[in-house]
Image: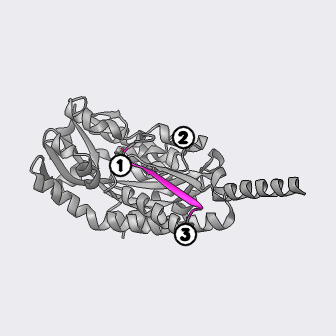
Amino acid sequence: MKLKLVLASALMAFGLSVQAAPIIIKYSHVVADQTPKGQAAIKFKELAEKKFPGKVEVQVFPNSQLFGDGKEMEALILGDVQIIAPSLSKFGKYTKQLQVFDLPFLFDDIAAVDRFQESKEGQAMLTSMKSKGILGLGYLHNGMKELSANKPLGYPADAKGLKFRIQASDVIEAQFKAVGANPQKLAFSEVYQALQTGVVDGQENTWSNIYSKKFHEVQGYIMDSNHGVIDYMVITNSKWWDGLPADIRKGLAEAMTESIKFGNKVALEESDSFRQKVIDDKKAKVLTMNKEQVAAWRKAMMPVYKQFEAEIGASLIQAAQKSNK
Ligand code: LMR
């Protein structure tokens, strides 16, 4: 009898301790907390932990603290991290379709990007990497990207011979080659130093990334070029996700949707204020491009479309083009 009691209480203790152990979700990313992605990750932690007190713990790792570019996808597939949100330009190893987002001057603005992501074609891409262990939980906006360099870039000829840091994207590589520049794929965490030491002369990024990583302090000129987009797919390890208890998975999906909405609001509302902060800092000159200049860049970069049409798919490119009003 005594033994039974001891056993029962031991089992209870064991049962309780199993129940008490929360599901740990590591959410890793490469940008600063104040950016749209940084804010969305913090919001996801808040919402998920509020929904499942004591059952779910979300650990957010910003600024490439846990994993930087290159490593984070492998870590996700290995189960070392559960959620990441890489830029759509960094999926080349896993799918060629997402390259569509890197085509220069494809989208007029973020509203057009949003329409395309919400379309049948956009939504299908979220589940297109399941066989590789990757599931897209949603798209998240950052913004349109701007060119920066240590000299003014009025026309494409000004970029000739300059070295530009690029994300790991073959389309972006081709885009810079089309204007006679030398693109170099570098991790986001290495950009500031590469600009500072002259390893590269320029880069392209959004206002929130430029300001929060102080690129404007090591660049002379930033062009309001809006020649492309930096957006994200928030992804998870599909096996881990499918293995979660159904109620938790449902609640986490809801928290993710809400956190993305919040991040998108930050992206929309704060882009101009990050631009203004760069101007106010008076470290780099912000130059606008007139219609003639924009047309010249567009024309110079257009050959990239033909180059990648077969890989991306002509119909996908057309679907994206249709999202412009
Ligand atoms: C970059 O590498 O420049 C961006 O993709 C970083 C990011 O995640 O916004």
Whether residue 75 is visible to the viewer of this picture, yes or no, is yes
- Checking the image for residue 31, the label placed there is 1
Residue placed most toward the observer, 164 or 316: 164
Percent position (x, y) of residue 106?
36, 56
- Disc with the residue nearer the chain's start (2 vs 3): 3
Q: What whole-number distance in Å separates the C-alpha atoms at marks 2 and 3? A: 27 Å
- Disc with the residue nearer the chain's start (1 vs 3): 1
- Checking the image for residue 241, the label placed there is none
Cβ of mark 1 under 8 A from ligand 1? yes
Residue identifier under label 2: 75
What secondary structure do most residues of the magenta stretch adopt? strand
Residue identifier under label 3: 51
- Read off the magenta span: 54-63
Q: Quick check: marks 1 and 3 in contact, CB under 8 Å?
A: no
- Give, as a three-letter code, the residue at label 2: Ala
Residue neighbourhood size for the residue with mark 1, other residues' Cα within 10 Å, grouped as few (<14), some (14–19), many (≥20):
many
Residue with the most extreme front position: 2
Percent position (x, y) of residue 119?
51, 67
The quarter of the image holding the C terminus is bottom left
Q: Secondary structure at mark 3?
A: helix
Q: What whole-number distance in Å separates the C-alpha atoms at marks 2 and 1? A: 17 Å
Name the residue: 34% across, 50% down.
104
Residue placed most toward the observer, 241 or 163: 241
